[in-house]
Image (cartoon, rainbow, N blue to C red):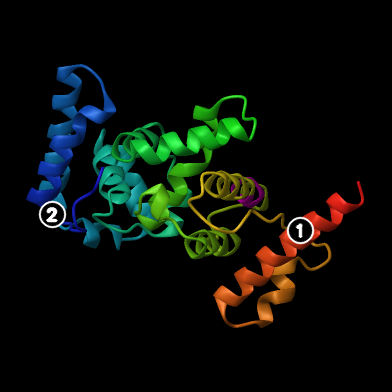
Amino acid sequence: MSTAAATSNAPDLLTAFAEHIDLLGGQPAYRRQRLAAAAAFLDTHPDLDAWLATPVDVRLVELRRREFAWQLVSFAIVSGRCRADADFLFAKNFGHSMARWITGLFPSDVERLRDAAERLGAASADVAVREVLPLAVAFRGRSPSSLSVDDLDALCTAIDTTPRLTEAMRRGRRGQLFRLRRLLFEATMVDLPAQHRREGGPATRQARLAIIPAREIRRTLLAYLDVAGAMILFSTI
């Protein structure tokens, strides 16, 4: 499903939210509560981009205070109508709404990733996709099939540098990102396979090739090394 052009115009956002609210499910009364909460939030913050520029902790407090407001904000983020900063995304507990929006807005992409997860041997394809996809889509505000290796690299950098994550949380996020890279590559959505990062160990191939300024040349060399390594391994069997 295509999404509207990026905008934080309150009437347009509320209309789009109302048109897609069924994707979250629930009884009619519950849906009316969500819509009323979204309208109240936009009455207070008609410019969502301006609200997203306020301090992270202020936003988190308001979302805890305003029931259902996160459902509107998460819809605006994943549909590309506004951009959220990485620290906010790391600090916010997404819950179920983010994954439901992504599944509803990009059903063909999610299905391709589920098929990829099954081919990779995931115990539950649904869980495998749901665990790794929402953060990356929210980080860039793009459909899964529109994510690029550059987007994933930028997310990796954000994970490494944010003060919002402990070292244990960083390792967890890096693991999720590695699994997402595998899924996207298996689904032919990106053209570079996932690479393990050796924490504190010898330099990885990416690190050794970092001196090459051209990204496309680095990717080509990495892909060549992967294929060459696989061929050498195969020839020894």
Which range is magenta? 170-174
Residue 8 at least partly seen: yes
Q: Considering the numbered disc 1 on the image, is that residue within a helix, a strand or a loop?
A: loop
Which of 115 and 9 lies nearest the eye of the viewer? 115
Residue 94: x %, y % from top left? 41, 39
Of helix, strand and loop, which mostly describes the magenta segment? helix
- Asked which quadrant contains residue 176, the reply is top right
Crowd rating for badge 2 (residues with CA inside 10 Å; few <14, some 14–19, many 20+): some
What amino acid type should be assigned to the residue bearing mark 2?
Pro
Q: Estimate the spatial distance between the alpha carbons at disc 1 and disc 2, rounded to whole Å.
A: 44 Å
Picture residue at 41% right of the left edge, 50% below the top: 145
Instruction: From this view, report whether residue 84 is shown above or below residue 31.
Output: below
**Quarter of the image where one finds residue 224:** bottom right
Seen at 39% across and 57% down, the residue is: 140
Tally of numbered tags: 2
Residue 235, position in %: x, y?
Answer: 88, 53
Residue that label 1 marks: 199
Instruction: Name the residue beneath numbered marker 2.
Output: 46
